[in-house]
Image (cartoon, rainbow, N blue to C red):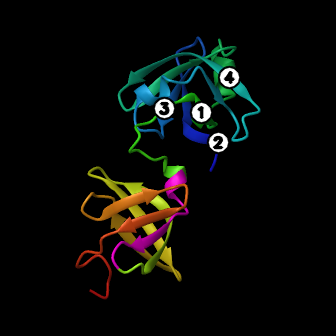
Amino acid sequence: MKQYLEVGKLNNTHGIKGELKLTLWCDDIDYLKQFKKLYLDDKGNKAVKVLSVRPQKNLAIIKLEGIDTIEKAEELKGKLLYGNRDDAKIDEAANYIADIIGCYVIDVDTEEEYGKVVDVLNYGSCDIYDTESWGKHTLIPATPDIIKEINTEYQVIRIKRMKGLFDED
């Protein structure tokens, strides 16, 4: 499991005092507000202290320690921010996308393997697991009637196969 997870991308400056606009890749700004520090790398070597975070439309405005001019903020444009998974809490029933990717999808009734999750998509109503097997992709809606168990420790997702889910139905 990855220790440092992407929380968003610094996509632009905001004002002249070093604030930045952050496109969130996490569920919401409340999750982001749990972090006292974030990282400019996925190894946890380049820590930056978070001074403030506030919402603005579908973005977050973030202020980082030591970034107090527009010129310093410009240097961070396009960079990803990472959070240490130990610095935030998620609901017991929730999972990080980084942990879902790589899980094997198995039929809860027959133990048939349907492939491996290679991406998690979301177009609004629910997450969709992009599962690949032998070069063929199948999109599986992550709804309670289909997803019966997620065990990221053992990298297994058990599903209830439904009519029309796979081409051969």
Residue 147 lies, in percent from the top left, at: 33, 62
Residue 96 lies, in percent from the top left, at: 49, 46
Q: Which residue is label 3 attached to?
A: 89
Work out whether 30 lies above or below 107: above
Residue at image position (38%, 45%) is 93
Of labels 4 and 1, earlier in sequence is 4
Mark 3: amino acid = Lys
Q: Is residue 101 magenta?
A: yes
Q: Nearer the viewer, mark 4 or mark 3?
A: 3
- Per the model, the C-alpha gap separating discs 3 and 2 is 13 Å
Q: Nearer the viewer, mark 2 or mark 4?
A: 2
Marks 2 & 1, CB-CB < 8 Å contact? yes
Q: Which residue is label 2 attached to?
A: 3
Residue 10 lies, in percent from the top left, at: 57, 32
| Image quarter of residue 162 | bottom left
Marks 4 & 1, CB-CB < 8 Å contact? no
Label 2: element kind: loop
Mark 4: amino acid = Val
Which quadrant, please, contains the C terminus? bottom left
- Per the model, the C-alpha gap separating discs 2 and 1 is 8 Å
Point out which mark residue 86 bears. 1
Q: Which residue is label 4 attached to?
A: 48
Mark 2: amino acid = Gln
Work out whether 83 lies above or below 113: above
Q: Which residues make up the magenta segment?
A: 99-109
Of labels 2 and 4, earlier in sequence is 2
Label 4: element kind: strand
Point out which mark residue 143 bears. none
Residue at image position (28%, 58%) is 143
Residue at image position (52%, 81%) is 135
